Image: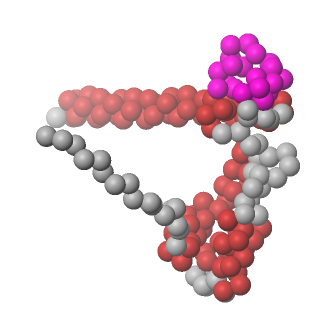
Amino acid sequence: MSETPKEEKNVAPFNLDMNKILPTIANLYKQLGWTIPIIEKLSGYKIPPEIITALDTLATGKPLSPEQMQNLKTQVETMQPGVGEPVMTRHLAEDAWLMHEDGMGTREIAEAFTKQGSPCSHSTVARWINLMDAEKRFSRIAKLIKFGKIAGFIGLMALMFVIGKFLL
C-alpha cells in the first residue's frame, strides 16, 4: 500500500476575540487585582496603565468604548519589553540558573548567552536567577504545606478514632 503525502494547510495565526476574552480576564482581575503590584515587582514587567484602566472599567460591568477597545488592541499587539526589563526566555532562565548552581558567575553566563546568539546583560541574568531561586523556594514551601495538611488531616482522623473508642 503506497502512502500519499497529506496536503499541509496554511493555518492562520491564532486570533483572539477581545470581546470574548476580556470579560473573563476582568473577572479574574476583580478577584486577584491586588496581586498585580506583587507580580510586577517579582517579574520586573510593568503592566501599562491603559490595560489596568480597561480592566477596572470591565470589572465594574461597563463595556469599553470603541476608542478604549482600539487602544487596548494596539497596546496588546505592540507590547515589547522596555529598557531594563528582563528579556530572557524561560528556557534560558532555567539554563542560567543551572549554570549558576554549577558555579558560573552572572557575567560569564551573560557572555556565554551572547556568544550563543541571545544577547543579555549580567543584571538580566542575575534578575532571572533570583526569580528562579524564589520559584524553587516557593515550590518547596508549597510541598511542605501540602504535606502538613495531609498529616494534619490524618492526625485529626486518628484523634477522632481514639476519642470514639473511649466514648463508645
Quarter of image, res 37: bottom right
Residue closest to the eye, 123 or 114: 114
Q: Identify the residue at image location x=22%, y=34%.
A: 164
Q: Identify the residue at image location x=39%, y=59%.
A: 9
Is 17 on the left or on the right of 42, as rendered? left
In the rendered structure, which segment of residues is drawn in magenta? 95-116
Can residue 139 be seen here? The reply is yes
Quarter of image, res 132: top right
Q: Identify the residue at image location x=36%, y=29%.
A: 155
* In magenta segment, residue 56: no
Where does the N terminus fall, quadrant-wise?
top left
Is 135 on the left or on the right of 5, as rendered? right
- What predominant SS class does the magenta segment belong to? helix
Residue closest to the eye, 104 or 160: 104
Percent position (x, y) of residue 33? 65, 62
Q: How many marks?
A: 0
Q: Identify the residue at image location x=81%, y=24%.
A: 111
* In magenta segment, residue 100: yes
Check the image and name the residue furthest to the top: 103
Residue closest to the eye, 160 or 70: 70
Check the image and name the residue furthest to the left: 1
Where does the C terminus fall, quadrant-wise?
top left
Percent position (x, y) of residue 68? 70, 81
In the depicted structure, whether residue 68 falls above or below residue 91: below
Percent position (x, y) of residue 147? 44, 29
Percent position (x, y) of residue 74? 71, 71
Q: How is the image coloured?
A: secondary structure
